[in-house]
Amino acid sequence: MNNSKDATKDQELPTWILKLNFHAHQPPKVADWLVRVMTTGMRMPGHVNAEIIPPSAVNAPEWTLLQRFEKMEHIAEWQGGSALHRLLEEIVPLLDQNMLEMSQFQMEHYAATSNVATAIITHVKPGKEEEYRNWVAQIHTAQTNAPGYQGTFVQPPAPGTKAPWITLLRFDSPAALDQWFSSDVRKRLLSEAEHLLRYDLMALTSAFPGWFPRDPLTGKTPPRFKTAMLVLLVLFPVIVLQREIVPPLLAPLGPSLSLFLGLTVSVCLISLVLMPLAIKLFNFWLFPTGVNPTKDNIRGYVAILCLYAAMVGISTMLKFK
């Protein structure tokens, strides 16, 4: 996910902004209402994405909801529609005067600040879209009440496409994120939705961001020594290829161009082919959740060490051939 590019694109979209102050004893009820506004707005024509940002400081105690649409006409339809009016009728009695502020013209970009974030790619099973929309509001509400919560960005698929839902979940620390992923509330909600979806998690603060997913059951990344071992397994043959085979083929192009093209080939091989394949093959070892996790761990270590030995042997043969 290209965050800077997406942020620039979002700044260009007409944005409906709702700011909400609440009494100290009302956050759970208000957070639940805000999630319902977000998920209801997602059903409107022209909706692109939505973002919830919780209070960031004691002197700024408001929640902010952003709904981005393709055109101003879509915002007008949403703001003037009966669905939003019914929701507003629910919340107004709970608030003091001037505690609710809405704007349909503001184009300012908002971004929650946090130390850790996880991208969640959700593939909803065909025919289960409406049921998923009803369920997803529950988990969004639950996570807004989790300790360390810093915000949620949600981009549903465009109408008529099979694209996945993209969610960026932010917490103030890795410990807070792990606490949410291992919580009983989250596990219960996911068990209720097993028939609706399959999803992938991508840690955005791991040692090798973008390569290794999180364990769907625990939400944790693989141990760093395992990711390092797998990176070495993939990197070594590519370096041998770069050193022994590619240079003679590209030598006529000159040193700078041949180096650039060689590195391009290496990066593409690692990121697009070898690393995804290695993660798939060694998934049982990265996330040992079988009947005998110890046996899976031993089997993975033995397999990797054997591959190390084979690669070193083949490299030696190539070098002294």
Image (cartoon, rainbow, N blue to C red):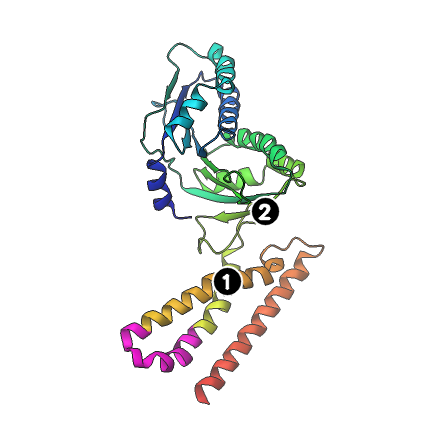
**Residue 53 placed where, x, y %?**
42, 30
Please give the name of the residue rendered at 52% of the width and 77% of the height, measured from the top-left corner.
311
User: Which dot, 2 or 1, sits closer to the camera?
Assistant: 1
Q: On the picture, is 285 further left or further right than 144?
A: right
Quarter of the view holding residue 188: top right
Quarter of the view holding residue 277: bottom right
Q: On the picture, is 129 further left or further right than 259?
A: right
- Which residue was labeled with disc 2? 216
Question: How far is disc 2 from disc 1 in space, using C-alphas?
Answer: 19 Å
Q: Are marks 2 and 1 in contact (CB under 8 Å)?
A: no
At label 1, the amino acid type is: Met
Q: Nearer the viewer, residue 317 or 263?
A: 263
Few, some or many residues within 10 Å of mark 1 (<14, 14–19, 20+): many
**Residue 154 placed where, x, y %?**
48, 36
> Which is the main secondary structure of the residues drawn in magenta?
helix
Report the magenta residues as a range: 239-258
Q: Which mark is residue 275?
A: 1
Please give the name of the residue rendered at 32% of the width and 73% of the height, measured from the top-left corner.
259
Q: Earlier in the sequence, mark 2 or mark 1?
A: 2
**Residue 147 placed where, x, y %?**
49, 32
